[in-house]
Image (spheres, grey):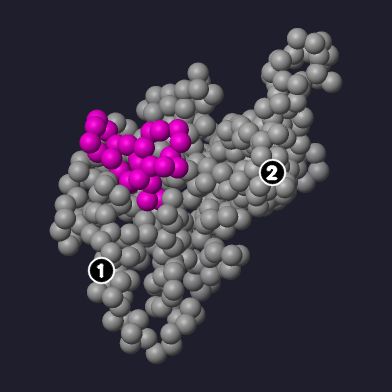
Amino acid sequence: MPQAGQPIWDSQGAGTNDFVVSFETSKNIFNEYRKRGIIGKISRPMKSMTVGAGPNSRELDIASTACVASKEITSGDEVRFTLERNLVGAPTYGDAQVKTGDFIAYMHARVFVNQTDSPAYPVQGDMSKLRVKDILPNQDAQIRKQLSLWMAEEQAYKFYDGVFKGASRDLTAPKNEGGRALDLGLGAGVQVSPENYIVAGNGPVSGTPGTSGYETNVNTALEGLTNTAGDKFSLQFLHYLSYWLPDSNIAPSEGMEGTKEAKYICLCDPDLLANITTVSGELSTAWQQARERSKSNPFFSNDEIDFKNLLLVPDNYLKKFRADLSGSGIVWGTNAADRRGFNASALTAAHMVVLGSTAMLEAHNGSVDITEDPGRHGKGRSISGHVKQSYMRTRWVPKDGSGAGVLNQNMAVCSFYQGAFAW
């Protein structure tokens, strides 16, 4: 019960749990928002295995071959991931003694979680409802539906922040804004650009990732993009990429929707794909001449493009992360907290994110918490949603912390010159 002198939701009464806000945990909203958009479709829960026997046994979480390794946190704010390295070594022939290989090696990564709160959506008062003829009868259900849409968008923004900046905003934001001010190597809260970066017309960016010199090289390469054929998205570049990825030891991932076919999932700024799929695009003639015009044809589809070992998937959210180079350093899209109204069409550096096996790590609490503030005297009621979820770009390190075995072969980012698409 609300206590006397307790006018607002976060003003505590005399008892330990005397808050006005009513609290509800919703698994349904959590499951619903994760199914919206591409990010939930390429995520898989972590698998566990037992190492050792008896009192020395322990559970290790082994990363699956999905693009996003997802793990639900059960206590604290830290989630640890473990990668089992592939066996390597030369074979032995004939009657020669079999050579001894190395032990199975494990590498580790960790992600911290932080809470993200939606805005508090007001519920129309009783008298206002009477004055509106066509008001929806169940506003609470409608607000919960809108919360699911809001969370789905926020999930995409967190994911791409992880891709381009190294970690989602709730981890890199300053502590006075509720973030963790995570230090990814260049200082607390400072973004770290993606490794394995290819800029059209320039090739792979050189330098040591995670250093200021590498950031300068990425910025310089992006500034060099011009309105010329070699700097634009093309089938010729896709041919090059399909061979470059295996040569760079970036492993493909499981296909979408649970299929086991090994593919590189390539999330694309939609304007990039529009360039090659329009009537005058490079794929137009190939599609017209395709003997089998169906989705199963590896060269023909209605939306995604299945090309060699690449599965190209357009994602509108990625368009909001075009590189802005007008100031000092790189701004991936916008630094504003709310990116929903941001239009990046005027920015000319567009991206394709190539996701290999376990390219991203996600930690979450498995539910959306719903709070309701009834307001003073039951007026001014509002509903808000809360989720603990964070993304980080994968960076595997040995258990002993040595830098010699750091493995960053999970993802590649490609950038192209792309103006506003002309319809």
Q: Position of residue 84 (x, y in %)?
A: 58, 50
Q: Where is residue 133 in the image (x, y as percent from the top left)?
A: 66, 47
Task: Tell me the kind of residue under disc 1.
Answer: Gln
Towards the viewer: 17 or 122: 122
30 drawn magenta: no
336 drawn magenta: yes
Q: Which of marks 1 and 2 is nearer the N terminus?
A: 2
User: Which residue is located at x 64 percent, y 30 percent?
Assistant: 77
Towards the viewer: 409 or 88: 409
Q: Residue furthest bottom?
A: 291
SS at badge 1 = helix
User: Which residue is located at x 65 percent, y 49 percent?
Assistant: 134
- Mark 1 = which residue? 236
Marking on residue 354: none
The magenta segment: 318-344
Q: Where is residue 46 in the image (x, y as percent from the top left)?
A: 64, 50
- Mark 2 = which residue? 139
User: Which residue is located at x 35 percent, y 40 percent?
Assistant: 332
- Identify the image quadrant of residue 239: bottom left
Q: Position of residue 116 (x, y in %)?
A: 58, 33
Q: Which of marks 1 and 2 is in front?
A: 2
Task: Tell me the kind of residue under disc 2.
Answer: Gln
Q: How crowded is mark 2: few (under 14 residues within 10 Å), some or many (20 or more)?
A: few
User: Which residue is located at x 76 percent, y 36 percent?
Assistant: 24
For the C terminus, the quadrant is bottom left
- Identify the image quadrant of residue 259: bottom right
Q: In this view, does 186 lie to the left or right of 204?
A: right
SS at badge 2 = helix
The secondary structure that most of the magenta stretch takes on is loop
User: Residue 35, relative to residue 71: is it above or below?
Assistant: below
Residue 402 is at least partly visible in this image: no
